[in-house]
Amino acid sequence: MLKINGLKKSYGDFHLDVSMEVPAGMVVGLVGSNGAGKSTTIKSVLQLIRPDAGSILFCGNECGAGGSLLTKSEKEMMGVVLSDSGFSAYLTPSDVKSICAAMYSKFDKNKFTALCRDLEIPERKQIRTFSTGMKAKLKVAAALCHDARFLIMDEPTSGLDVIVRDHVLDLLRAYMEEKEDRSILISSHISSDLESICDTLYMIKKGRIVFHEDTDILLSRYGILKCSEDQYNEIDRQYICRRIKESFGYTCLTTEKHFYMENYPKLVIENSGIDDLILLMEKGENVS
Amino acid sequence: MKGLLLKDMLLLKNNKKLYAILVFFAVMYPMMGMGSFTITFLGMMGLIISISTMNYDEFDNGNSFLFSLAFKRSTYVAEKYILCVGGGILGALLGTLVCFVASKVTGNPALLEGMAESLCVAVLLYSLSSSVMLPIFIRFGAERGRLASYLTLAAFFLLGFGVMNFLPDTGKDVFVSGLQNIPIAGILVRLVLLVVLAIFVSVSLSLRFIRKREF
């Protein structure tokens, strides 16, 4: 669906250099700390900013640094949610429905109305009176109602409480189940959301992809070891990729927690999630 | 383009208080015998209100999301020109209609004097103003565009002031006598061609600016 190859963009001291892929039928997560380059990557795909170099292939069409602008029909295939931008605050959801119906040939007004009702979005009130959560819900509702093949979502569940977040994730799962060739690229700081919905994860740090793994492998095979210095010096470190020096010894990220469970039963081993991954990749050091 | 025009119409409908004030002045000016002024005033307000849609687009970083929607950047430019030039012309036409109605209601035929000329001047002036302002707003954004517009207007004013006060009298005499030798229709045709050329150059610039702009 989307293939990014050597995408480069520089802002002062920040240099983005990213290669990643979103295959058809998959949900790909993009994680990283603030300022890592998630939004820059997403904006480059949407051609809101012009990359300095690199290629972006969307449905087989080149639209990167040297490529053409996205056509209207290509943009109609995308559903977009941006964290820091949305419809004008002086519009109402009813206005948004009319505008989207005029812009998108496949926009489903009835589905939008039903989603607004379902997500408790008042159709006749101006967006500027909405809470952060309601604005987020409206953005997701608008993105889901025009039969987009590809959703590109920058923190879509930000500002939502746990119940509504769960509901929105259900909507995204249902969206994926409707057609096999749909894809989602989603960035979020809420790791539990990504763990529950993403098939594969990319982590971006200081403009570069530093980690890429399938989510189920990350959750089933990766683990956190907590060991003293003596224990650390004794264990086989071939499956340890990152470590942080602690007061008690080391916290380590391992790619094969079962190896350590079987061979070092006295070692403290915890399941790892995306938060642990981010912490260790950000603060930890490589174990060569 | 339909979606963009609809968006702007829906945003503009929020200005009810402003429209009420405009209606008040639109009724008051003809009553005071200021027919021609009504035409130029409403034309100017039509242009300003239309251009204000760019403020709405930019407000709260809205442009990032707006330009991710399903339209081409060139369509955005086309829509703004249609809206702004159309807004100025529509305002001037409304002003003409108001004057016509006011002349019948008040029985004051003087309101109809110079109406056609005022309408022509307003249409040409506001089309020219749109062609100057729109590329500036597209290039610099609404906030900085406003400042750039004032500076551009100031530059035009200074140029005119400079020409009027520093051009030798013989130069001015030649220019004025040259104009007097051209029939009104000829002057009008030349002005229309000038405005068409200005709009053509303006659209070309706007398209270049919008393609390079980042959000």
Image (cartoon, coloured by chain):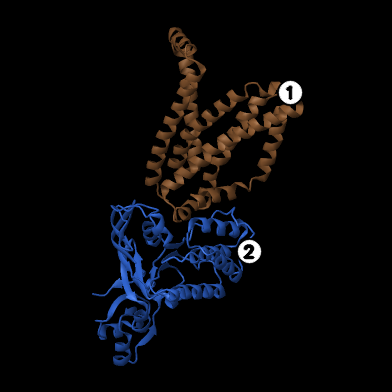
Chain colours: A blue, B brown
Residue at the (50%, 23%) spot, across then down? B157
Q: Where does the image place residue B97, in percent across and percent down from the top left?
A: 65, 32
Res. A241 visible in picture: yes
* Relative to A126, residue B73 above or below: above
Q: Are marks 1 and 2 in contact (CB under 8 Å)?
A: no
Q: Secondary structure at mark 1?
A: loop
Q: What label does residue B5 carry, if any?
A: none
Question: Where does the image place residue A91, in percent across and percent down from the top left?
Answer: 59, 54
Write the residue at 52% across / 28% down.
B125
Task: Return the residue found at the far top.
Answer: B170
Front-most of residues B132 and A275 = B132
The answer to which quarter of the image holds residue A253 is bottom left
Residue B47 visible from this viewpoint: no
* Quarter of the image where the C terminus of chain A is located: bottom left
Q: Position of residue A8 (x, y in %)?
A: 30, 56
Image check: B189 left or right of A237?
right
Q: Residue under circle 1?
A: B108
Frontmost residue, A91 versus A85:
A91
Mark pair 1, 2: CA separation: 51 Å
Q: Residue at x 39, y 38 (%)?
A: B205
Tag 2: amino acid = Pro
Circle 2 chain: A
Question: The disc numbered 1 marks a residue on which chain?
Answer: B
Quadrant (top left, top right, bottom left, bottom right) of the N terminus of chain A: bottom left
Name the residue tied to disc 2.
A122
- The vertical placement of A182 against B191, above or below, is below
Q: Nearer the viewer, residue B169 or A279?
A: B169
Q: Quadrant of residue A125?
A: bottom right
